[in-house]
Amino acid sequence: MQHLLNSNIRYLPVHEQDENWSLMVRTAGFQSILPNSIYPTEGHSLNYSFNYQNGRVLDEFQMIYITKGSGTFESLGCKNVSIGEGTVFFLFPGEWHRFRPEQTTGWDSYWIGFKGKFAENLVANGYLSLNKPVVKVGYNEEIVSLYRRILEAGNEERAGYQQYISGIVIHLLGYIYYRAKDNHYEDKDIVQKIDKARVLIREQINENISPEDIAKELVMTYSWFRRLFKQYTGLAPARYISQLRLQRSKELLATSSRSVKEIAVEMNFESVDYFSTQFRRQTKMTPTQYRKSCLGK
């Protein structure tokens, strides 16, 4: 049996001040497991060691990224699944799990263990799911680079490093979510149509453009266009247009001397009153109040 090719494992101390941060990192590491190696390996802290047959339960989240090789993963909420290069899988506090590389391939893996209200909120709001802990993002140098930056900072343990690396973890979580959402749309023609729709909207935001007009230009039925657009962007086309118009209105209020009425007309709102109502609904201020706040009055 062979052993590890190389590894970098860090168990990071957490101070009381760190616990008040929205997220704290407890461990980070990299391991390269050669084919036909003994697994699980030795050298882990007692809290992280496990027997594959019995599995394991942790009191933290972990985000594990496989960059080479293949293996299997299963948890209480997820049946046994194959994982390979470019796969991220999540472990959840209190959730039984086990995983291992295939004997014939071994694997290279990066991981981060973390806790905090930020991660708990991701689960509560459906961004992370115990039933769908495996995410395919493909091999990505940006993800590898972020893991390495965490390891470098963890090795040095300079003052404030916990807050620094927790920010990188948040960045990683957002980037992985973005990559997973983007990869979900394998039909590149649809993605191109949605991208074109957003370009058309931005180019014509000052004109009397409607979602129906955009759908016609893309040679799509409005119902189909609306459904795809909302699935991809998270916003219905009408709301997307409205938000862009309000954003442009805020820029004009802050940087120009145009009156509220002139801005409402320029941005194609039905009336000044409608513009003011929509603006206040979004910003909790009237257009005039917003302009004064930008001028420091």
Image: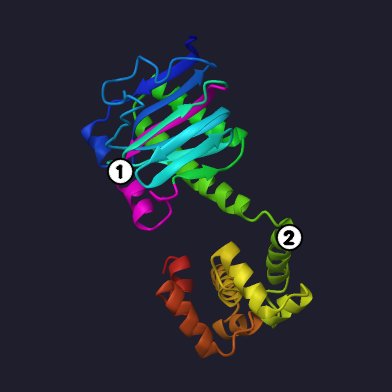
Asked whether, in this view, residue 197 is left or right of residue 24, the answer is right
Q: How is the image coloured?
A: rainbow
Quadrant in which the C terminus appears:
bottom left
Query: In this picture, is 228 found above or below 270?
Result: above
Q: Which residue is mark 1?
A: 116
* Residue at mark 1 to residue at mark 2: CA–CA distance: 38 Å
Q: Nearer the viewer, residue 8 or 254?
A: 8
Q: Secondary structure at mark 2?
A: helix
- Magenta run includes residue 130: yes
Asked whether, in this view, residue 191 is left or right of residue 3, the answer is right
- Magenta run includes residue 184: no
- Residue 192: assigned label: 2
Q: Residue furthest left?
A: 16
Residue 157 seen: no
Q: Position of residue 39 (x, y in %)?
A: 42, 19
Residue that appears at 31% across and 32% down: 56
Q: Position of residue 200 (x, y in %)?
A: 73, 69
Q: In the rendered structure, which amino acid carries the disc numbered 2?
A: Gln
- Residue 21: assigned label: none
Mark 1 vs mark 2: give the one in front: 2
Query: In this picture, is 115 found above or below 232?
Result: above
Q: Position of residue 148 (x, y in %)?
A: 51, 27
Q: In the rendered structure, which amino acid carries the disc numbered 1?
A: Gly
Q: Mark 1 or mark 2, which has the lower sequence index?
A: 1
Residue 266 seen: yes
Asked whether, in this view, residue 152 is left or right of residue 263, the answer is left
Residue that appears at 35% across and 36% down: 97
Q: Nearer the viewer, residue 184 or 55?
A: 55
Residue that appears at 35% across and 32% down: 162
Q: Which residues are magenta?
A: 105-132
Q: Secondary structure at mark 1?
A: loop
